[in-house]
Image (spheres, rainbow, N blue to C red):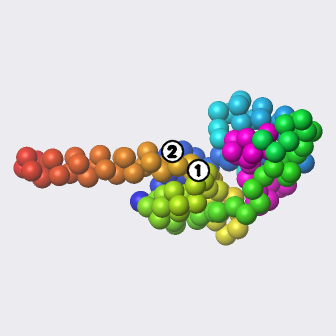
Amino acid sequence: MLISEILKRKGNDVATTPPDAPIRSVVATLAGRKIGALVVSADGSTIDGIISERDLVRGLDADESSLMTRTAADLMTAEVVCCSPASSIDDLMNQMTQGRFRHVPVLDDGSLVGIVSIGDIVNARLDELETERQHLTDYISGR
């Protein structure tokens, strides 16, 4: 299965924040949208970085007193692993597991077209396994 199939189901909406957004705004957006990461982007289509709950926890641990005075650019992960709509979910799942990250922006010709989480990938894989199970059951029972 390809990432494009996940995006067909979940859509192409990507929550972004500008690099100069205050951390208070980042936290409010994450909480309000019930998501774990925001793509940091000055223009909404290119990627400057990504800021996740983990980045916020690391920032809190490093300097609790100044956390809320900082910006998304101060805490974001600047080197972002991305994929394309043609990427395989199996390959991406392995990459996410090995790299210990949970959110991957999707780029098509350099433009942001979606984001997938490890949860999206696990759900897609479970759907694949259920379909395979059903085909095997049908085959064995002669349907």
Q: Is residue 125 left or right of residue 24?
A: left
Numbered label attached to residue 102 = 1
Q: Nearer the viewer, residue 70 or 108?
A: 70
Expressed as whole percent of the image width and height from the top left, the position of residue 45 reads 76, 57
- Whether label 1 touches label 2, CB < 8 Å: yes
User: What residue sits 73% from the left and 53% below the top?
Assistant: 50
SS at mark 2 in the image: helix
Task: Return the residue found at the far left.
Answer: 142
Q: Nearer the viewer, residue 84 or 30?
A: 30
- Real-space Cα distance between discs 1 and 2? 8 Å
Amino acid carrying label 2: it is Gly
| Residue assigned mark 2 | 119
User: What residue sits 63% from the left and 63% below the top?
Assistant: 82
Callout in the foreground (1, 2) = 1
SS at mark 1 in the image: loop
Q: Which residues are magenta?
A: 41-60
